[in-house]
Amino acid sequence: MQKLYRDHAIVLRTHPLGEADRIITLLSRRHGKVRAVAKGVRRTGSRFGARLEPFGLIDIQLHAGKSLHTVNQVESIESFAQAITADYTRFTAATAMLETMDRLSDDVIDSSPRSFLLLVGAMRTVAAGRIPPALALDAFLLRTLALSGWAPELRVCASCGAEGPHHALDVSAGGLVCSACRKPGAIALRAAAVEHMIFLLAGDWDSVLAADPTVQLEASRIIADTITWHLERSVRSLGYVER
């Protein structure tokens, strides 16, 4: 990587460093996840402090370092923060999206733009408010699992490949399992919830919005359990999302 480079990025999280600096965690379009120091950004007269807040899509110039990069310039491309923070349900759903991306290991988020574009699209969807935030979050989590190679198998048995429909999901096996492959701990799942997850992955919003609320909630719990199992730790923000 060249020492000085520019990229588009979304701010995932920030935390203070010393009296005036801040460490910024970014998901960038071409360089994957990046951690950088923004020097003096917490001072009142900082030139780009407000641009380095979560939910912002930015054009950023960075100087590459051994472990932490350094922020040189920042320009705002699109800010989703105002629309997202004005509504609690949008805020919690968008925060869960950022935390999920941040918790994925660096070897899962590669330097291709797919994860970045998925996150940008999800931020736009939540900010626009046309889709219920919890449903936008569920679709985002499923698609994130798919990009990471962890999408649950929803059509055939994840263990033996037998054609469905199947009515139990085993997260450790990778998805739905048939009655012969079902082990203790597999979760019973209604066919409507399976169809709902398929619609979420496909972006079939008409079918997603038409689902019964109990079906939506059942699928949401399965999706949350699946992302938690693969990350090997909980996404704390999911606990605050209103379903």
Image (cartoon, rainbow, N blue to C red):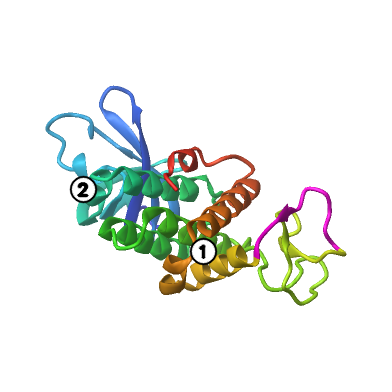
Residue type, mark 2 in image: Gln
* Residue 35 horizontal/vertical position (percent): 41, 43
For the point 48% across and 57% down, which residue is it?
213
Crowdedness near tag 2: few (<14), some (14–19) or many (≥20) residues, C-alpha within 10 Å? few
Residue type, mark 1 in image: Arg
For the point 33% across and 49% down, which residue is it?
90
Residue 188 drawn in magenta: yes
* Residue 14 horizontal/vertical position (percent): 35, 37
Bounds of the magenta segment: 181-190
Name the residue carrying label 2. Answer: 82
Q: Quadrant of the N terminus?
A: bottom left
Single out the residue that lies furthest toward the bottom: 163
How many marks the image carries: the answer is 2
Pick the front one: 50 or 162: 162
Give the CA separation, mark 2 to mark 1.
Answer: 25 Å
Mark found first going from the N terminus, 2 or 1: 2
Pick the front one: 101 or 191: 191
Single out the residue that lies furthest toward the top: 19
Residue 235 drawn in magenta: no
Residue 237 located left or right of residue 56:
right
Crowdedness near tag 1: few (<14), some (14–19) or many (≥20) residues, C-alpha within 10 Å? many
Q: Main secondary structure of the magenta part?
A: loop
Query: Mark 2 falls on what kind of element?
Result: helix
Q: Is residue 113 visible?
A: no
Residue 33 located left or right of residue 49:
right
Question: Residue 37's quadrant in the figure?
Answer: top left
* Residue 18 horizontal/vertical position (percent): 33, 23
Name the residue carrying label 1. Answer: 143
